[in-house]
Image (cartoon, rainbow, N blue to C red):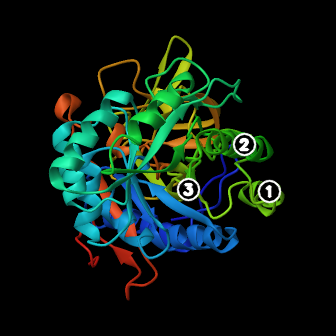
């Protein structure tokens, strides 16, 4: 296979590693050997994941702790790769807690989410979660009864929906009417409720307000707002604050804009932390996308090229039933074209050169589009479209079984293995 052709649209991604390139070459070699099943796979570069997160952890200030929000990608291989690096995991359901426990019996777990059922709270306590983020007064009262019945002291954080005007981001969970958290005017009542029983230990507050914010300085000012508000509550209600959870929300760009600058964010944050606004308290972050998006790729072979009403379409083996993020967020997902030499048919190979093309999937719906009217230098039937930044909110948010198409392969590449390439769906330890 030749080197990947450059797409005309510029995007701020890191180039795939040699391990990813070797695996793409293997697809072409398999086709040349007579395997004609079209390419469709998620590829995860576990070495790149560890390198990225280890660098983030090295730069983290003292008394800051970094957790991984499992909702971004609950793949057990990614959890296993992250477990030795991060402070723990944030889970938004009992299913995610179970997945974490499949990998680690001892990993620290924060349990959040607005719809916790009694049975979930019971099981979460049995599975040894570190803290529970309480999202409403009703949830607080139910948790109190469960904790009292079990004879436990349960550490909690109150998630608060602030009434400040917050910066705009791709997703906003506070500063406006949403289903998340306790409304700020109810904070006094929630604190009083938490203090009614020794079975609950109020450790602090959870203030995750925006998601996929690309502005690092703005995000540092947002964290400053969080800490100032918690300090005011601590003084007003005479609280001992053990921690403040500032959530995640560090943005990944899917267009020409730069990604969230982690280094710049920490530089802006350090003077604030040096002032020690909450003595003895830890500051927690729980990003998901920003940790795992860069290590994942979605590869889909071009099955057909066609024109309709003057527009060019490429039909892929795959689509939004595997990778729903672009359709969900209505963006053109960054990609590159990976040329493949092998052509098994006796007639000419359909080819587009220097054209704009819409990358559509195999579903019987016009909404099955991963990128629309994007320029490509060259695209042929049989080439592979490699979507970058596909490690977060891809497979697990998608409607896998719509129309009954075959699932993609899931391939894990790791430089810690002798042959450098890991096969699909292997249990830990990963095997070829």
| Cα distance in 3D space between marks 2 and 1 | 21 Å
Is residue 176 placed above or below 59 in the rendered structure? Answer: above
Lower sequence index among marks 2 and 1:
2
Q: Which mark is residue 228?
A: 2
Residue 326 shows in the view: yes
Q: Which mark is residue 417?
A: none
| Cα distance in 3D space between marks 1 and 3 | 23 Å
The residue positioned farthest toward the top in the image shown: 309
Is residue 58 placed above or below 354 in the rendered structure? Answer: below
Please identify, in this view, whether the residue under mark 2 or under mark 1 is nearer the observer: 2
Locate residue 403 relative to residue 352 in the image: left or right: left
Residue 375 % position (x, y): 65, 34
Residue 406 shows in the view: no
Residue 145 % position (x, y): 21, 41
Secondary structure under tag 2 reads helix
The crowding category of the residue bearing disc 2, from other C-alpha atoms within 10 Å (few below 14, some 14 to 19, many at least 20), is some
> Circle 1 sits on which residue?
264
């Amino acid at each position: 296979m030749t080197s990947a052709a450059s797409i005309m649209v510029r995007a701020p991604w890191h180039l795939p590693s040699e391990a990813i390139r070797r695996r793409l070459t293997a697809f072409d070699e398999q086709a040349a050997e007579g395997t004609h099943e079209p390419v469709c796979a998620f590829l995860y570069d576990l070495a790149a994941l560890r390198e990225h997160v280890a660098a983030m952890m090295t730069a983290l200030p003292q008394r800051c702790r970094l957790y991984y929000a499992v909702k971004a990608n609950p793949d057990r291989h990614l959890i296993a790769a992250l477990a030795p690096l991060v402070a723990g995991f944030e889970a938004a359901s009992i299913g995610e807690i179970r997945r974490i426990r499949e990998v680690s019996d001892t990993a620290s777990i924060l349990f959040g989410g607005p719809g916790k059922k009694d049975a979930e709270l019971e099981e979460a306590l049995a599975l040894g979660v570190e803290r529970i983020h309480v999202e409403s007064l009703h949830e607080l009262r139910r948790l109190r009864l469960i904790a009292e019945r079990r004879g436990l002291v349960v550490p909690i954080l109150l998630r608060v929906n602030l009434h400040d005007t917050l910066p705009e981001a791709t997703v906003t969970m506070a500063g406006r009417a949403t289903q998340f958290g306790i409304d700020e005017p109810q904070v006094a009542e929630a604190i009083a409720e938490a203090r009614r029983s020794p079975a609950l230990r109020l450790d602090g507050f959870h203030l995750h307000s925006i998601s996929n914010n690309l502005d690092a300085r703005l995000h540092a000012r947002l964290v400053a707002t969080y800490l100032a508000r918690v300090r005011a509550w601590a003084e007003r209600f005479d609280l001992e604050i053990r921690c403040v959870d500032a959530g995640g929300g560090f943005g990944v760009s899917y267009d020409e804009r730069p990604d969230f600058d982690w280094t710049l964010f920490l530089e802006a944050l350090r003077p604030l932390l040096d002032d020690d606004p909450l003595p003895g308290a830890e500051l927690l972050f729980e990003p998901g996308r920003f940790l795992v998006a860069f290590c994942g790729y979605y590869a889909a072979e071009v099955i057909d090229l066609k024109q309709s009403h003057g527009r060019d379409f490429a039909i892929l083996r795959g689509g939004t039933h595997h990778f729903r993020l672009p359709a969900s967020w209505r963006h053109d997902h960054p990609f590159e074209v990976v040329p493949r030499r092998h052509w098994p048919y006796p007639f000419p190979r359909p080819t587009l050169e220097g054209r704009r093309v819409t990358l559509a999937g195999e579903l019987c719906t016009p909404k099955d589009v991963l990128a629309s009217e994007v320029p490509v230098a060259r695209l042929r039937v049989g080439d592979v479209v490699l979507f970058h930044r596909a490690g977060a909110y891809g497979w697990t948010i998608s409607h896998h079984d719509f129309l009954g198409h075959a699932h993609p392969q899931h391939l894990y590449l790791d430089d810690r293995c002798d042959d450098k390439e890991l096969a699909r769906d292997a249990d830990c330890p990963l095997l070829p």
